[in-house]
Amino acid sequence: MSKKALLHGYDVSSAGDVRALDVVASQGHPEAGWYRWIHLELDDEESITWLAQFAELPPEVATALASTHPRPHVERVGGGVVLVLRAVNPDPGAVSEEMVALLAWIESDRVLTLRRDPLAALQKVEARMQQGTAPTSPASLIAALVDEMQSRIDGAVGSLEDRLDDIESRAAEGELTSAEVSDLSDVRRHAVTIRRHLAPQALALADLLHVGLGFDQEHRLSELAQRTRRHVDMLDSIRERAGVTQEEQSHHLADRLNRRMYALTVVAGIFLPLGFLTGLLGINVAGIPFAEHPWSFAIVAGACIALLGVEIWFFRRRGWL
């Protein structure tokens, strides 16, 4: 087993004692009064081989844990539970709506967790293991992991809400710039993407209480499920608010475009008769009225100005101007 594939393994007693584990040399289950936590990285073929040959898992479980794009869910298989959850990607170079998967196989005395991408929750819980404050049961380990994941989701959802509040305050002061409209669309898209994962995750956490493993963290897991549902409600609110703001901006843009088109139409309507008159008088034929009169140009120009005044009076009387 390469170091890349095996991230860590621990045996933990019910009293909270922790000892590091050599996974290859310690296959199977721990001794009585202890539980075992093994975490693997799924980007390595050796992890898949270990799961299939040495983890003593049902074939369907090994296949489920190797899934590429799993949806959050919980499923009872034989004497254990397959649990799939999603967390916000902690990579600084990643966009906030990218959510990485945590896959777990949970038994009464063993927990296997797997991931493909960095997951800060795992690092936080492992640090607690090394500091001597380890979760004392498989259920408390899962609850600790979910709690850390939820903290990250809190930050992501809160950041979206703050961005939307700022955009709405600027929209109240006037029309948004193209960059601000793009930012608004980005907020809405992120909310939709995160919600797509969190909605089934709330159901998975609720179902985890009823899988029949005798979890000792029912109250804590119930609170985490409710917390996830609140995130879903907040994301729904963000999506709806962003949609309303987008509609208002579209209305403002359409209204501004209509006003400009109206002004151009009025100007074209005013100058259409004048254009016709000047075009008619510009033809080079004999018999044009006042062609020999020295004041003919002034008379024609005055007639055009008078016609312009009559048109403006008529447009205002009709309410068009």
Image: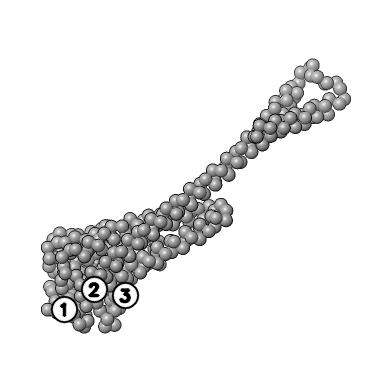
Instruction: Find residue 266 and report its horizontal and vertical position in percent.
Output: 65, 35
The disc placed on residue 34 is 1
Q: Which mark is residue 140?
A: 2
> In the displayed structure, would residue 306 be above or below residue 81?
above
Name the side, left or right, on which 304 lies relative to 212. right
- For discs 2 and 3, the disc positioned in front in the rendered view: 2
* Image quadrant in which you'd find residue 309: top right
Q: Are marks 2 and 1 in contact (CB under 8 Å)?
A: no
Q: Earlier in the sequence, mark 2 or mark 1?
A: 1
Q: SS for tag 3?
A: helix
Q: Residue at x 52, y 45 (%)?
A: 251
* Amino acid carrying mark 3 in the image: Lys
The answer for how far apart the CA atoms under marks 2 and 1 are is 13 Å
Quarter location, residue 8 = bottom left
Amino acid residing under circle 1: Trp
Q: Is residue 253 above or below residue 26?
A: above
| Residue that appears at 40% across and 63% down | 157
Query: Mark 2 or 1, which is nearer the eye?
Result: 2
Q: Is residue 277 left or right of residue 101?
A: right
Tag 1–tag 3 contact (CB < 8 Å) = no
- Residue 297's label in the rendered image is none
Foreground: 214 or 30?
A: 214
Residue situated in front as seen by the camera: 294 or 236: 236
Q: Which mark is residue 124?
A: 3
Q: Is residue 264 left or right of residue 171?
A: right
Do we see residue 45 in this rendering? no
- For the image, the number of numbered tags is 3
- Labels 1 and 3: the sequence-earlier one: 1
* Secondary structure state at the residue bearing disc 1: strand
Callout 2 touching callout 3 (CB < 8 Å):
no
Circle 1 residues within 10 Å: few <14, some 14–19, many ≥20: many
The CA span between labels 1 and 3 is 21 Å
